[in-house]
């Protein structure tokens, strides 16, 4: 599904953020990248949706080099969730969720129904659809951010510390919810964190990074047995 072949990134100024990354991620797999701040996790995610260029090597999605894909198409086929979700304050929750469907010119009724259906998945009251982001708690806003990434049904979802800013209890319930969602929807998910408990809870396989390199890959069990 997602393949990294000898991928490296050197920023202007000479910082080597990622060095010779090799990894094959399977369809439907939940992969968690973990490592200390500055080890190259975010850089890796940004290369996948081409927010930044790859310096060396290649990234393939379903066998196709992302460099050869139309960048708009590529970004629409990837749901991207970050910690600073940035809901649009002047747009309703329904509009915020259905942002990409709107760009894809889905009719309004279909967009609203899609937002409704997604809100149900996270057990939020449908009355929120017509409300505005400032009426929601941080945890609820983060749920909307996740739903927004799912709205146009992308096969691949990248999540960069999506629950990082939340209090532990909200975080815990969102993790449960999200794991459940992932199992039901069968998405391929690449999730970034620096929290080992979160990695163990969510991952099919954990990828441990240090200083731009992968140092270990394994199931949570394997990682726990062989730290
Ligand atoms: P992580 O997500 O694991 O915290 P990053 O991918 O953000 O790590 O950063 C990896 C390295 O690249 C760090 O040394 C960081 O300072 C550097 N870096 C990140 N973004 C830039 C940039 N735009 N320009 C130069 N260096 C950067
Ligand atoms: P309207 O006609 O209702 O103003 P627009 O199509 O202009 O709708 O966009 C609605 C909102 O979505 C605006 O706040 C705009 O900034 C935002 N928006 C438009 N394109 C994108 C995009 N590619 N990514 C994120 N937000 C976008």
Image (cartoon, rainbow, N blue to C red):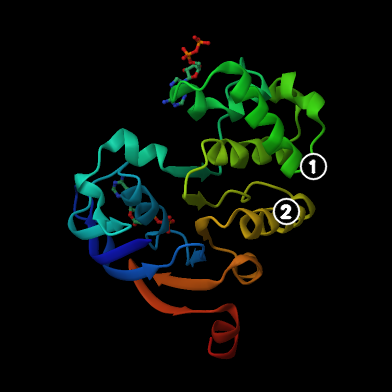
Q: Residue at x 67, y 38 (%)?
A: 118
In the rendered view, does 75 fall on the left or right side of 143? Answer: left
Q: Which mark is residue 218?
A: none
Q: Is residue 131 visible?
A: no
Q: Residue at x 45, y 63 (%)?
A: 27
In the rendered view, does 223 fall on the left or right side of 197? Answer: left
Alpha-carbon neighbours of circle 1 within 10 Å: few (<14), some, or many (≥20)?
A: few
Looking at the rendered structure, the number of numbered marks drawn on it comes to 2
Q: Residue at x 51, y 73 (%)?
A: 205
Q: Which mark is residue 123?
A: 1
Picture coordinates of residue 44, whole percent (x, y): 36, 56
Closer to the camera in the image, 176 or 34: 176
Alpha-carbon neighbours of circle 2 within 10 Å: few (<14), some, or many (≥20)?
A: some
**Mark 1 and 2 residues: CB-CB less than 8 Å, in contact?**
yes
Q: CA distance from mark 1 to mark 2?
A: 9 Å
Q: Residue at x 26, y 49 (%)?
A: 66
Q: Is residue 86 visible?
A: yes
Circle 1: element type: loop
Circle 2: element type: helix
Where does label 2 land, which residue? Answer: 177
- Above or below 111: residue 191: below
In the rendered view, does 64 fall on the left or right side of 219? Answer: left
In the rendered view, does 77 fall on the left or right side of 66? Answer: right
Picture coordinates of residue 202, whole percent (x, y): 62, 65
Q: Is the residue at mark 1 in contact range of ligand 2, meaning its CB lies under 8 Å from it?
A: no
Closer to the camera in the image, 36 or 44: 44
**Which label's residue is closer to the chain start, 1 or 2?**
1
């Amino acid at each position: 599904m997602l393949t990294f072949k000898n991928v490296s990134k050197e920023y202007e100024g000479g910082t080597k953020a990622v060095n010779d990354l090799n990894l094959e991620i399977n369809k439907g797999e939940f992969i968690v990248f973990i490592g200390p701040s500055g080890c190259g996790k975010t850089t890796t995610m940004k290369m996948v949706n081409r927010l930044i260029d790859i310096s060396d090597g290649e990234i393939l999605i379903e066998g196709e080099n992302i460099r050869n894909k139309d960048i708009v198409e590529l970004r629409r086929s990837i749901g991207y969730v970050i910690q600073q979700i940035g809901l649009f304050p002047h747009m309703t929750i329904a509009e915020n969720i259905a942002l990409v469907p709107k760009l894809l010119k889905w009719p309004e009724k279909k967009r609203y129904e899609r937002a409704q259906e997604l809100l149900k998945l996270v057990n939020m009251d449908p009355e929120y659809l017509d409300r505005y982001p400032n009426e929601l708690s941080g945890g609820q806003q983060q749920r909307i951010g996740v739903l927004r990434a799912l709205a146009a049904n992308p096969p691949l979802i990248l999540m960069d510390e999506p629950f990082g800013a939340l209090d532990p209890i909200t975080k815990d319930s969102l993790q449960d919810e999200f794991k459940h969602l992932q199992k039901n929807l069968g998405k391929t998910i690449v999730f970034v964190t620096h929290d080992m408990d979160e990695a163990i809870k969510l991952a099919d396989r954990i990828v441990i990074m240090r200083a731009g390199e992968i140092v270990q890959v394994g199931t949570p069990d394997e990682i726990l047995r062989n730290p």
